[in-house]
Image (spheres, rainbow, N blue to C red):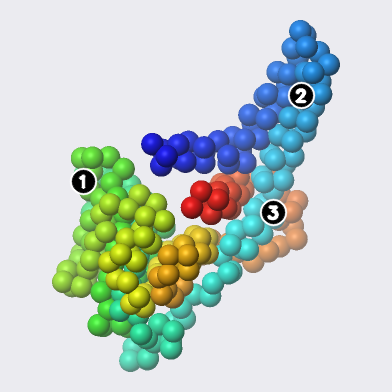
Amino acid sequence: MFFHLKKILGFWAMPLPLGFVAVVLGVMLLRQKRFRVLGRRAGWPCLICGCLLLLIFGNVGVANYLLFQLEERHAPIPELAQGMPPPDNLAPCQYVVVLGGGTLYHEGRSSLTRLSWHSLARLAEGLRLAHVLPSAQLVVSGYSAEDLLPTMASEYERAAISLGFASGRIVRFDTPKDTREEITELRARIGDAPVAVVTSAFHMERAMVLCRELRVNAVACPTAFSSRTQKNADFLKWSLGAYATSAVWFHEWLGRLFA
């Protein structure tokens, strides 16, 4: 129940729906006649706040800046040529953990094409690191949003095997619904063993906060970077895509709040 409530509240707390609702509520309060003074006192703040939300978080420069601040908190694992030793912080890791990122299930599609863009990027990075850590196991995680559909973890497993990865090196966590549950199960299964945690760059900080809280010995391995080099001209542009980018920032901070 709490999980679904978080999803509903999370949607309406995003800048576009929240700003739109505030504008509509403000107009309705200003137009009502029964409590005119109260309507004006509450209506103008709602209208102004709604307009500011839409104006600020729909700006391309602001949205890209917010995403950049999330993604640059942890450095990615550098390119590793064949035969090159892994970095000192990565070398002791006994597990490479790929956190769930969503699926686009379709029965007629291959396992790879059923992964969302972020899931595909996470799996690719996980496999890259697992290849340079030949003794490490690949942990894939994620539940099924519907009872009759495969779990996120099983989709990861099929995709990894289709790319030639050994099935005997794969461990599945099929039940975690969110990041806290994933890290909690990780702690319960592996204890203090060092792990490489792979997730999207914008999500990495929240995952690492939970790892520290739950005493998981984790190395941050961000992937799927989306922010780009900031340009001054971006602050003169507005787009629907900017709302989606800003929503990522809102989602991560709300996730930290509810975690």
Q: Which residue is mark 3?
A: 62
Q: Residue at x 48, y 68 (%)?
A: 212
Label 3, residues with CA under 10 Å away: few <14, some 14-19, many ≥20: many
Of pointers 1 and 2, the one earlier in the residue sequence: 2
Q: Residue 248, can we see it? A: no
The residue at the far right in this view is 37
**Residue 85 percent across, percent down from the top left:** 37, 91
Checking the image for residue 108, the label placed there is 1
Q: Quadrant of residue 68?
A: bottom right
Q: Which residue is mark 2?
A: 43
Q: Amino acid at mark 1?
A: Gly
| 63 left or right of 165 in image | right
Dot placed on the residue nearer the N-terminal end, 3 or 1: 3
Viewer-closest of 125 and 42: 42
SS state under label 3: helix
- Which residue occupies 72% across, 24% down? 26
| Of labels 1 and 2, the one closer to you | 2
* Residue 133 position in % (x across, y down): 31, 82
> Disc 3 to disc 2, how far (Cα)?
27 Å
> Relative to residue 103, is residue 35 depicted above or below?
above
Q: Residue at x 69, y 54 (%)?
A: 62
| Label 1 crowd (10 A; few <14 / some 14-19 / many >=20) | few
Quarter residue 168 falls in = bottom left
Vertical position of residue 6 compared to residue 134: above or below? above
Secondary structure at numbered mark 2:
helix
Query: Which label's residue is closer to the chain start, 3 or 2?
Result: 2
